[in-house]
Image (cartoon, rainbow, N blue to C red):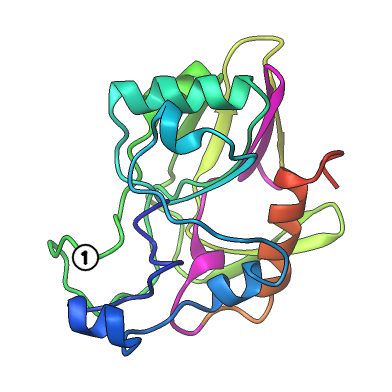
Amino acid sequence: MGTIPIYWGESGNVNELLGGDGASHWARLELEKSYDLRPLDTLTPESLSGLKHLLLAQPRALSAAENVALDDWVRGGGRLLLFADPMLTGKSKFPIGDRRRPQDVVLLSPILKHWGLELQFDVERPEGFVLIQATDQPIPVNRPGSFVALGTPGPCTLAAEAVLASCSIGEGRVVLLADAAVLDLYDPHPQAAAALDWLAGTAWSERGK
């Protein structure tokens, strides 16, 4: 689920969508090597029932009910990979203001604060890909944000210049990246596929490996 069109690709209309003429996303093919994907429009106890893994890719602002449903699902053992970019840099064929365009600024403060995190952004940070190091896997980012852990001790551990957070929430696990350049549809970074595989494995494996 998210405004980055991983599942459907960037389609201008229904005909493009149904005919497969839109710009398909490389990340869907990469993820489908290991996972069966199911698109979600909303987060409810019903839509999340039976799911063990969830990917939120620059999601729209969640309603209060969706925040509750997501938190309950994670605490019950769900495993979430969340891309939360405070200033999206990826290209889109749709102009600013078009509802089909990925959301430029993520708006998830309520759920992040509930999990003990605050997302920050340095407006002076220059644009351009850089690699941050997460253990043995470099992750390409472009004007990323950073997380601040609230409370001591908190449920979250920060890494990779605080761009990456890993949180134990109840019986579940949340892995968050304060950037979404890994998921650029057009001209993806050469390390993007490997980084996505590593992030998915970190978030969704039983031992976080």
Q: Nearer the viewer, residue 120 or 99?
A: 99
Image quadrant in which you'd find residue 22? bottom left
* Residue at image coords 16%, 72%: 95
Q: Residue at x 43, y 37 (%)?
A: 47
Name the residue nearer the viewer: 181 or 146.
181
Residue 166's place in the image compared with 53, above or below, is above
The answer to whether residue 77 is seen in the rendering is yes
Q: Which residue is mark 1?
A: 100
Residue depicted at 72% across the width and 20% down the height:
171
Q: Is residue 133 left or right of residue 3?
A: right
Residue 76 forms part of the magenta stretch: no
**Can you see residue 192?**
no
What is the residue that sits farthest to the left in this orientation?
A: 97
Would you say residue 164 sits in the magenta stretch?
yes
Q: Position of residue 201 (x, y in %)?
A: 76, 53
- View extreme (top): residue: 152
